[in-house]
Amino acid sequence: MAKKIIKEKSIEEALWESANKLRGSVEPSQYKHVVLSLIFLKYSSDRFTERRNELVSDGKEAFADNPVFYNAKNVFYLEPESRWDYLIENAKQNDIAIKIDKALAKVEENNPTLKGALPNNYYAGLSLDRTKLAALLDEINKIDTLKDRENDLIGRVYEYFLGKFAIAEGKGKGEYYTPKSIVNLIAEMIEPYRGKIYDPCCGSGGMFVQSMKFIEAHHGNKKDISVYGQEYTNTTYKLAKMNLAIRGIACNLGDMAADTFHNDQHKTLKADFIMANPPFNQKAWRAETELVDDPRWVGYEVPPTSNANYGWILNIVSKLSANGTAGFLLANGALSGDGTELEIRKQLLKNHLVEAIVILPRNMFYSTDISVTLWILNKNKKARTAEQNGQMVKYRDRENEVLFIDLRQWGEPFEKKYIQFSSEQISQIASNFHAWQRGSSEYHDTPEYCYSATTEEIEQKGWSLVPSKYIEFRNRDEQIDFDTKMLELQNDMRKLLKQEEDSKEELKKLFEKLGYKLD
């Protein structure tokens, strides 16, 4: 009997149809979790089969059931009941949800790097209609998971679902996906080549993935980076572990999903690089009596209970190594808050920690259209020479300076209504920033783009970090020659009046021909 030919679909097309199979049975915010674990099983099974065939063709069939020969190639070993073919064969059975849960449990059991990464008894608990689940498996079966040889499948899927269901995902809930072009900009600016990298609110691990891609793009060594992170939501924590494991990125995300403020999983960590996108303007993040003596605030006022922005800043500061650098996003309101926030901001500046403030364009995020700020902090802004990817780089003393950059008019259209930075723009922005750091003649203050302000100037502006207070903005009206413009307007007005008089005369003649005399 001829084997049935399966029509190949694009990942996006198949995913959309997969999501449609879930409508009415699962909340939109859960779509990605339902689909991702199944795609993970399909991808893992495809890789397993590929590796198994390699062993057989190389005459190593005796080792085809030895997990060591799979793990050595960053391939997960799968027992028969965890393989995709087995699930497809049983897709229409009443207990298919239980079989999927058992398959995931076995994969995790046989592959230590996946410990805590996969959902436990998840599908049985969804109570999905058997036919819908079978239809979902059928759609995912149409995806060629091995086409994406960079192992970026999980990331692509996650990005797709966040894009399609951004509003349902958590607009107003503080769960924001960080667009790749922003992560790329952060990586190019802080250059995480070697050392420990940390994300205190890592989501699905996107910052880490893009950091590794940055290293690959610059011909660095991924083994020179150690990954540390923390995530509050359990399903997202598992997703991050799955996301990183499938790419072979070793990570320490703590023993469990936990709140960074109340259950810090990395209390003694000193990171060389920090990249983060904390929830914007998080309210009621601690009670009045909670965390008042937390060591992360030592030397600063205790961050206010009304907004966690400065709590995130001080958590990040406390984790920086002696030469550590951080790039993170915050709502623009953090640039000019008063009261306790003003005192913390003032101390950050007096401690020479703020390196750059970058205003980003609107419509860069799937779940909010607001413009946000990229903060760059640096623990050591003194003149020094440092090794960067095999080269020695000289930095000038910048302790009493902050670079302000306004990118609100930058970016290019993306997916109809969104904005992203092009690779050329990212390169230009990062180059300008590094030229400023290194005292290159290529950097110069540019109206409507960038300005290097002294601490004294910032103090005179009330310790505000709003870029428009420092960057020169040209008044277009001042460039007009008013005398010339007025003459042009007068001539235009004379022409209009002449045309009006001519029209009246024509109308008068018309009425006279009809026998009416007009005074």
Image: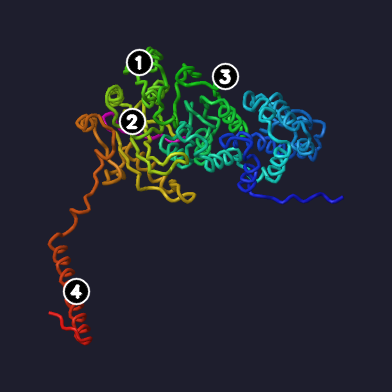
Alpha-carbon neighbours of circle 4 within 10 Å: few (<14), some, or many (≥20)?
Answer: few
Q: Left or right: where does residue 11 sit relative to residue 69?
A: left
The amino acid beneath tag 2 is Ala
Q: How many marks?
A: 4
Sequence order check, earlier mark of 1 and 2 = 1
Mark 2 or mark 4, which is nearer the start of the sequence? 2
Q: Give, as a three-letter code, the residue at label 3.
A: Asp
Vertical placement of residue 177 versus 196, above or below: below
Q: Quadrant of residue 100?
A: top right
- Nearer to us: label 1 or label 2: 2
From mark 3 to mark 1, how far is it between C-alphas?
A: 26 Å
User: Mark 3 against mark 4, which lies toward the viewer?
Assistant: 4
Q: Which residues fall within the magenta stretch?
A: 389-401
Q: Secondary structure at mark 3?
A: loop
Q: Amino acid at mark 4?
A: Glu
Q: Which residue is mark 1?
A: 298
Q: CA distance from mark 1 to mark 2?
A: 20 Å
Q: Which quadrant is the C terminus positioned in? A: bottom left
First in sequence, mark 3 or 1: give its number.
Answer: 3
Residue 300's spot in the image, x, y percent?
32, 18
Are the residues at dot 1 and dot 2 in contact (C-beta closer than 8 Å)?
Answer: no
Give how far apart the Cα atoms at labels 4 and 1 are. Answer: 77 Å
Circle number at residue 334: 2
* Residue of label 4: 500
Would you call the spot at circle 3 few (<14 residues within 10 Å), some (14-19), or many (20 or more)? Answer: few
Q: N-terminal of the two: label 3 or label 4?
A: 3
Colouring convention used in this rendered image of the protein: rainbow
Report the residue marked by disc 3.
Answer: 255
**Which one is in front, 513 or 65?**
513
